[in-house]
């Protein structure tokens, strides 16, 4: 089994707000992220796939194909977007880094030929990242 | 849905690697420059990984403000700008980064209970790092 990781970057804005919380609760739980005018990040996404090396090509996955899938399924939908207002997954869920990693997993799952999705890692900042392995 | 969250922190500390159970020559052989009697220091980078179900109310595994506060109070205030050899945690253990990783893991396992502590990863320099998962 070989693991391959592809990295890409996207920039997006968001805010954290739970309509079931009072304004005070939103501020207490989400801190500065509760500012309804939003703020943004340069996100780094690392997608790791796993599989056996194809003896004809020496590849675990066709990188061109992986790059196209990442562009089509993730970057076109998220890059330079407002996550709360433009990305359907976040119409009702809060666009935390945890939920972003889960949403990206679901966008990619089942789209890959041969290789299997192993991990989605999303860096919101150089000192903060979330890993999602598709665990329930 | 279960997710893993990792947060990175920086602290600086000095230490000297020296075991009372070894002779002077054995200490020099085992620890090399790290056995220098006056000690030396590092900028340590600590990565703390916690895991758990993403809370549907908050979208979070745990509240980052609480995690930061616990690590600041329990780890950074304890070790930042300190000489590790003078700390009570190392009265009978050599302050190698292996031992420091385990000490920090055990401190956080006791003090942070809002999510499951998966591991701590400690970089002593850009070239070497250590992981401890209990």
Image (cartoon, coloured by chain):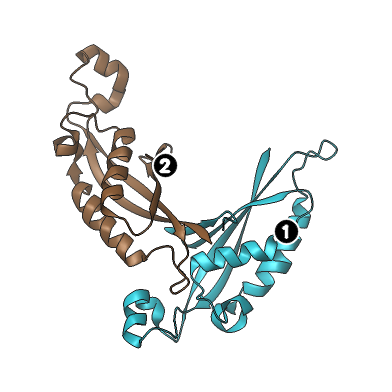
Chain colours: A cyan, B brown
Quadrant where the image shows the N terminus of chain A: top right
Depicted B14 relative to depicted A26: above or below: above
- Mark yes or no: residue A126 visible: no
Residue visible at 35% across and 75% down? A29
Q: According to the image, label 2 marks what residue?
A: B126
- Disc marking residue A6: none
How far apart marks 1 and 2 lie (CA) works out to: 30 Å
Depicted A67 relative to depicted A61: above or below: below
Residue visible at 74% across and 59% down? A110
Please tell me whether mark 1 sits on a helix, a strand or a loop.
helix
Which residue, as the protein is rendered here, is positioned at the far right? Answer: A56
* Mark 1 crowdedness (10 Å alpha carbons): few <14, some 14-19, many ≥20: some
Do the residues at discs 1 and 2 belong to one chain?
Answer: no
- Indicate left or right for A111 with B4 as reference: right
Locate residue A135, reporting x and y percent. 57, 55
Residue visible at 48% across and 71% down? B56
- Disc marking residue A67: 1
Mark nearest the camera among 1 and 2 is 1
* Mark 2 crowdedness (10 Å alpha carbons): few <14, some 14-19, many ≥20: few
Considering depth in this image, is A82 or B40 the residue closer to the camera? A82
Considering depth in this image, is A132 or A7 the residue closer to the camera? A132
Report in which chain the residue with disc 1 lies: A
Quadrant where the image shows the C terminus of chain A: bottom right
Please tell me whether mark 2 sits on a helix, a strand or a loop.
loop
- Indicate left or right for A56 with B59 as reference: right
Considering depth in this image, is A30 or B134 the residue closer to the camera? B134
- Mark yes or no: residue B4 visible: yes
Locate residue A78, reporting x and y percent. 62, 73
- Indicate left or right for A56 with A63 as reference: right
Report in which chain the residue with disc 2 lies: B
Locate residue A95, reporting x and y percent. 51, 74
């Amino acid at each position: 089994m070989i693991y391959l990781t592809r990295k890409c970057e996207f920039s997006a804005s968001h805010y954290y707000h739970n309509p079931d919380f009072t304004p005070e609760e939103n501020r207490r739980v989400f801190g500065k992220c509760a500012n309804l005018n939003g703020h943004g990040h340069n996100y780094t996404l690392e997608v790791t796939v796993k599989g056996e090396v194809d003896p004809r090509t020496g590849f675990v996955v066709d990188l061109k194909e992986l790059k196209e899938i990442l562009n089509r399924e993730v970057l076109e939908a998220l890059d330079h977007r407002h996550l709360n207002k433009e990305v359907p997954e976040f119409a009702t869920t809060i666009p935390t880094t945890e939920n972003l990693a889960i949403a990206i997993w679901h966008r990619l799952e089942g789209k890959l030929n041969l290789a299997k999705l192993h991990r989605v890692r999303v860096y919101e900042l150089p000192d903060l990242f979330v890993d999602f392995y598709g665990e329930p | 849905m279960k997710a893993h969250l990792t947060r990175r922190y920086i602290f600086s500390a000095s230490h000297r690697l020296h075991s009372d159970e070894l002779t002077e020559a054995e200490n020099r052989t085992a620890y090399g420059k790290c056995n220098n009697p006056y000690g030396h220091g590092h900028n340590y980078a600590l990565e703390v990984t916690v895991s758990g179900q993403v809370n549907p109310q908050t979208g979070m595994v745990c509240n980052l403000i609480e995690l930061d506060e616990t690590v600041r109070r329990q780890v950074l205030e304890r070790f930042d700008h300190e000489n590790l050899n003078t700390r009570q945690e190392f009265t009978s253990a050599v302050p190698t980064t292996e031992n420091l990783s385990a000490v920090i893991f055990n401190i956080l396992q006791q003090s942070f209970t809002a999510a499951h502590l998966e591991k701590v990863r400690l970089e002593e320099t850009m070239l070497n790092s250590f992981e401890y998962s209990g």
